[in-house]
Image (cartoon, rainbow, N blue to C red):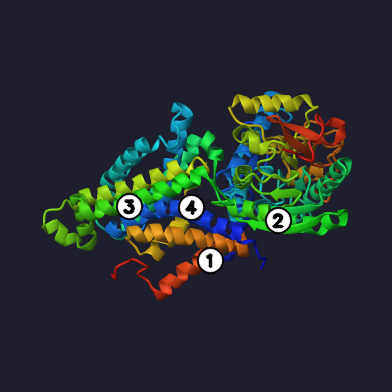
Amino acid sequence: MRSYPPEIVAEVVLNGLLTGSVYGLVALGLTLVYGVLHIINFAHGALLTAAMFGVFVLHEVFGIDPYWALPVMAPVFFGFGYLLQRLVIGPAARGDDSNILLVTLGLSIVLENLMLAVFRSDTRSVRIPLANEMLEWGPMLIPAPRAIGFVVACIVAVLLFLFLARSSTGRAIRAVAKERTGATLVGIDVAHIYAITFGIGTACLAVAACLLLPSFYVNPRVGNAFVLVAFTIVVLGGMGSVPGALLGGLFIGVVESLSGLYLGESLGQIGIFAIFILVLLVRPTGLFGAKA
Amino acid sequence: MTTATRRTVLATAIAAPFIAPRAGWTQAGSVKLGILQPLTGALSQDGEYGRIGAEIAIREINEAGGIRGMRIEPVFGDARSAPEGGVAEVERMQAEGVVGVVGGFASPICLAASQAASRYDLPYVVDVGVADTIVTRGLRNTFRFGPGFGVVTQTALDNLSALNDAAGKPARTVVLVHEDGLFGTGLARLMNAELPKRGFEVLETIPHPSPSRDMSNVALRIRALNPDLVIPSSYYAEFALLAQTMQQRRIRPKGIYAVLNGAASNFRFVREFPEAAQAVMDCNHWADPRKPATARVKAAVEAMGRFWLYNVALNYSAVQLMADAIGRAGRPDRAAVIEALAATGPAFTSHIMPYGPTRFVNGQNQSAAPVNTQVQGGDIKVIFPNDFADARPIFPVTG
């Protein structure tokens, strides 16, 4: 194993933290949907891709900077997610969890192929002047888009945590997550809460898309690259836990980064999946997850 | 369980010739040709450009009166970016009665699909796949018009040495970056064996998966190693990401000398990342700018709002080769088409590649060779071979 100077290792760790924050944001949506609806949303990757294409179109057609697209994309995707759950996933599932799995899987196939038909298979990028800006921190160079991504991801996680803890809708979401029948008995509209949760999860993806696009690319399959790692983060952080998703994302980002440095980028993925298996064996509830 | 009686076996044997798909001229006066590309999945971008090249060739041939008056009817197949997908589509094309198959793009797909085609003596012309094993398995049905790994690497190394010598040998140390599939790994192995013989020291070989979410670590390792040259062999997205990251982090080697790179000879990359793309060299497939048909095909691609990629030129040429062979075979007989393909000679000139007179040995076109390109001022220029280079190389890169 090759040894590297400390400043390179420090930069790799920092890079892992910055990348991990966006992983955390993608995982936030996934964990929220799992925590409340108790299903794995297989359409998560396709929805992230759709959000990235949304940001791309806003930039190419209307000239809107990806960061300024955030106030547009987040509510639009909240609405899209809400309607998707209310009008498609909920009715098609007919109350059976295994049906929801299949519906989201079907949705992902439909969405991916729809994007392939509309946008073709080309890999596209958005060019903004900020993409090449670097912040100098001692000997380290931090790409500005990554730094912005880190700050926004942390803000979103804190806001979401506060929303779930303090607001009446947040309390209703937690109530449905813990005891669906009980929540129905006290007058909570479970279908509405499901749709809101799905909408929030989708809005998180829209935010992630706005943060990713200035330094990443988009093609009809791009979301899948993030979803597999998001599943690992959800398991590590604890299914349904908001702080777990963010901290898990940061941790996985650093592990991926360091194992990439020392084991090579190809073998670097081993680190992530070794943790996945280890968590399932030793602490199946994850770092912050409650016992089932 | 049903037991086959003598009567059913006999009946099946008699009916078989009428039930089995028949290759060749159809009743409507057309000939079916299989066009296999990875149209969905990780390789769909390349597959789509391959399909465009094949479509343009078919359209031109049909507009010029077809093959001996018979129109080409394309049967498109999607390999779904996987060998098994390619095999499934070859089986379907065989059932539909195609007279030959063109395409495959990636080496693993070409290997599996041509093997499947060989079971039916179905002529198969590989478009891009460069693995040498594609034409060394003794399959009579498989032909490759473009160059394989061996020739590409040899040309890349010869031109690199010439480039370095001409500049006064400014480069000595090299870092290899490659995608970790069959294509990148094979190329890296060859480079690792050959570069030291030519006076270069390989500091490190860095494989990466495709797709990669982040190339920052690769860039940081390059910065730590501080090589004179970076030689990347990756698909489009990963190289675009790496070049952008290197530019952001101000990592400026004396040269980026790509081999069979998915982005360095791609106008989309040049348009979207002009600063990162500047002075990147590539040893790759490239259409012959001296041929009038090249400008015509390029104009057709650009009229569709698409970028000019080598996949288009290679598939255009591969379809022309197959059509030429079918025409010379004179009948829709697969064995006759295979013989005609093997006998293709200098008279085949309807392709747009910069190759010498065509001559096949064991399915490999002996005159196929790559060229060297370099991004200069927002354009892709040819820097080697000298007889049709339209620019002098910028090397070493300074500033």
Give the residue at x 60% y 30%.
B306
Q: Nearer the viewer, mark 4 or mark 1?
A: 4
Secondary structure, mark 2, is helix
Residue type pointed to by label 3: Val
Q: x, y percentage for residue B337? A: 76, 42
Tell me if mark 3 has few (under 14), some (14-19) or many (20+) residues whose alpha carbon lies within 10 angstroms of its own: some
Residue type pointed to by label 4: Leu
Give how far apart the Cα atoms at labels 1 and 2 are: 24 Å
Placement of A30 over or under A123, stated as above or below: below
Tell me if mark 4 has few (under 14), some (14-19) or many (20+) residues whose alpha carbon lies within 10 angstroms of its own: many
Residue under circle 4? A18
Describe residue A235's horizontal placement relative to residue B211 as left or right: left
Which chain is indicated by disc 4? A
Q: x, y percentage for residue B125? A: 72, 44
Residue under circle 3? A158
Residue type pointed to by label 2: Leu
Compare marks 3 and 1 and give the one earlier in the sequence. 3
Residue type pointed to by label 1: Gly
Give how far apart the Cα atoms at labels 3 and 2 are: 40 Å
Give how far apart the Cα atoms at labels 3 and 1 are: 28 Å
Compare marks 4 and 1 and give the one earlier in the sequence. 4
Give how far apart the Cα atoms at labels 4 and 2 are: 23 Å
Describe residue B70's horizontal placement relative to residue B19 as left or right: right
Q: Image quarter for residue B22?
A: top right
Give the residue at x 32% y 66%.
A289
Question: Is A175 in front, or is A45?
Answer: A175
Tell me if mark 2 has few (under 14), some (14-19) or many (20+) residues whose alpha carbon lies within 10 angstroms of its own: some
Residue under circle 2? B225
Q: Are marks 4 and 2 in contact (CB under 8 Å)?
A: no
